[in-house]
């Protein structure tokens, strides 16, 4: 609980509070009461995702006997990468880049021809669509059905899916929450960080109870000595 409260205070630049994290975020980010459940849903849906990179990093550190602060720091370091939690920044940049496009299909097709990566779509574990994204987008739609930002996200999602046949994933849905609720820049990454912190702590506690050191072996496959 203290780890989560410390990180929530860091994200919001507010004193440590005993309030639930989603309520602290809502106060700091001035989210209307009827929209606060969307913040909570985002945190819950991002809490855990089996052995993703940051959870595995946290477990490796926990297996050394390090405390929960150390395990959480390992998770934070892994989350920052653009192929993990940092993907939200890439999605946010795409939202901004295409916002004033008069022809999304043509602009996206141009990016694909130029071999520009389209972030926020597809997931190797969900070939038929990321159920977390489906659930979160439904929560956003129920809270703010007339949002212009939501309408834009829906248009963008449909255009990308039509071109590359991949559905929006949780990174796209998380950035949609940031934009629809009018949250500060990089709030999507902050939500990912705080939600996943609960998962890291759970993994670390489980690993500590297991009591074994995670120590993979490596096999040399380079040139033979003296070759």
Image: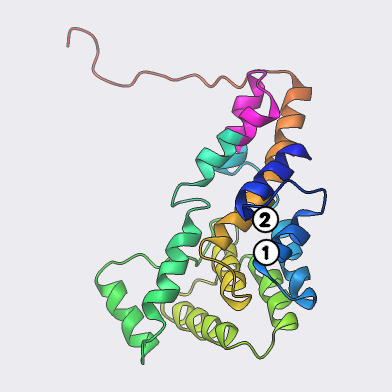
- The disc at residue 55 is none
Front one among 190 and 74: 190
Asked whether, in this view, residue 72 is left or right of residue 107, the answer is right
Q: Residue at x 67, y 52 (%)?
A: 14
139 w.r.t. 115: above or below: below
Residue 104 in percent (x, y) is at 39, 86
> Can the viewer see residue 196 in this picture?
no
* Residue 18 belongs to the span the image colors magenta: no
Pointer 1 or 2: first along the chain: 2
Residue at the image position 69 percent from the left and 18 percent from the top: 212
Looking at the image, the residue that sits furthest to the front is 15
Question: Principal SS element in the magenta part?
Answer: helix
- Mark 1, Cα crowd under 10 Å, few <14 / some 14-19 / many 20+, is many
The residue identified by callout 1 is 132
Residue 63 picture quarter = top right
Secondary element at image label 2: loop
Residue 191 or 119: which is nearer the viewer?
Answer: 191
Looking at the rendered structure, the secondary structure element under dot 1 is helix
* Residue 192 % position (x, y): 61, 55
The answer to if 58 sits in the magenta stretch is yes
Specify whether residue 14 is in view.
yes
121 relative to 67, above or below = below
Q: Which disc is residue 46 wearing?
A: 2
Please report the bounds of the magenta region as a residue range: 56-72
Q: Are marks 1 and 2 in contact (CB under 8 Å)?
A: yes
């Amino acid at each position: 609980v203290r780890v989560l409260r410390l990180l929530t205070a860091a994200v919001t630049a507010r004193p440590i509070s005993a309030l639930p994290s989603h309520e602290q975020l809502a106060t700091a980010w001035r989210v209307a009461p009827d929209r606060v459940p969307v913040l909570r849903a985002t945190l819950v849906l991002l809490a855990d995702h089996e052995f993703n990179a940051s959870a595995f990093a946290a477990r490796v550190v926990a297996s050394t006997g390090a405390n929960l602060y150390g395990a959480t720091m390992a998770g934070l370091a892994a989350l920052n990468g653009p192929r993990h939690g940092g993907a939200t920044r890439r999605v946010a940049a795409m939202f901004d880049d295409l916002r004033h496009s008069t022809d999304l299909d043509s602009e996206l097709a141009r990016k694909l021809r130029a071999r520009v990566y389209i972030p926020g779509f597809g997931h190797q574990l969900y070939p038929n669509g990321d159920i977390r994204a489906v659930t979160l987008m439904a929560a956003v739609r129920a809270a703010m059905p007339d949002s212009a930002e939501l309408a834009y996200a829906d248009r963008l999602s449909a255009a990308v899916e039509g071109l590359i046949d991949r559905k929006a994933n949780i990174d796209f849905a998380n950035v949609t929450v940031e934009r629809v609720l009018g949250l500060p820049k990089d709030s999507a990454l902050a939500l990912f960080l705080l939600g996943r912190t609960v998962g890291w702590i759970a993994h670390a506690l489980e690993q500590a109870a297991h009591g074994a050191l995670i120590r993979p072996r490596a096999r040399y496959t380079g040139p033979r000595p003296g070759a």
